[in-house]
Amino acid sequence: MHKNTVTALATTIFVLSILNVLSAASAADGSATAGGAAMTPVGRVQAMEKGKLKNPLSSTPEIVEEGKALYQAKTCGACHGSNGSGIHCPSLKNDAWVYGSDDDTIFRLVTLGSEKLLSKGYSRGDKEQVAGPMPGFGEAITDEQDLWKIIAYIRSLQPSAADK
């Protein structure tokens, strides 16, 4: 091989290695994933101040159906019931929201879990009596769009909360 070709090849490999490391670091902190646009729920919570998160997805029948499938796949139904009526944990169909019914609170609750949510200055309401600690699912749900779809499904269970 010609010396210039070897040098060019080595430089290309070096640059690609650097880009790969930067891409992996970016994805690890939740700031970007494939395509550079999506974030993890943990990354989104870290990037947005309290009260500013709002579901960017329209609640179309397709989004709600995808959210329902994700709700089941991520085992939300194990505690909240397959249809959201509650088993060991609160029903998602009534007006008694433990920490609040707005998008920001629900997104942070699912991402962080109830203990971390409380440590961030949120408070527990007194309407719902069936509520143990909720684990955070920020590591299990790796794409914020998936969490927004789950929230759209939850909203479909209680249309009166859809405008929150």
Image (cartoon, rainbow, N blue to C red):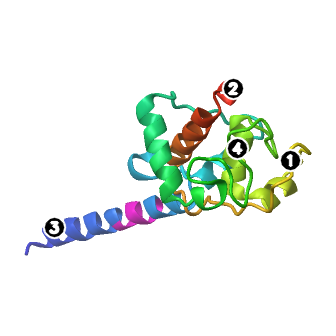
Name the mark on residue 103. none
Q: Tell me the quarter of the image containing the C terminus.
A: top right
Q: Which quadrant of the view contains residue 2?
A: bottom left
Give the Cα separation between the discs numbered 4 and 1: 11 Å
**Tag 1 or tag 2, which sits nearer the N-term?**
1
Q: Which residue is nearer to you in this view: 61 or 83? A: 83
Tell me the residue that label 2 is attached to.
160
Range covered by the magenta-colored residues: 17-22
Q: Position of residue 111 (x, y in %)?
A: 66, 54
**Tag 4 or tag 2, which sits nearer the N-term?**
4
Give the Cα separation between the discs numbered 2 and 4: 15 Å
Tell me the residue that label 4 is attached to.
106
Rendered residue at 49%/45% (across/down)? 68
Which secondary structure, mark 2?
helix
**Pointers 2 and 4 in contact (C-beta within 8 Å):** no
Tell me the residue that label 3 is attached to.
4
Closer to us: mark 1 or mark 3? 1
> On screen, 146 above or below 25?
above
Give the Cα separation between the discs numbered 1 and 3: 61 Å
**Tag 1 or tag 4, which sits nearer the N-term?**
4
Labels in figure, total: 4
**Tag 3 or tag 4, which sits nearer the N-term?**
3
Name the mark on residue 122. 1
Q: Which quadrant of the view contains residue 118?
A: bottom right
**What type of secondary structure mainly makes up the magenta span?**
helix
**Tag 3 or tag 1, which sits nearer the N-term?**
3
In the displayed structure image, the side of residue 89 where residue 128 appears, left or right: right
Closer to us: mark 2 or mark 4? 2
Q: Which amino acid does label 3 sit on?
A: Asn
Q: Which amino acid does label 1 sit on?
A: Tyr
Q: Position of residue 109 (x, y in %)?
A: 72, 51
Q: Tell me the quarter of the image containing the N terminus.
A: bottom left
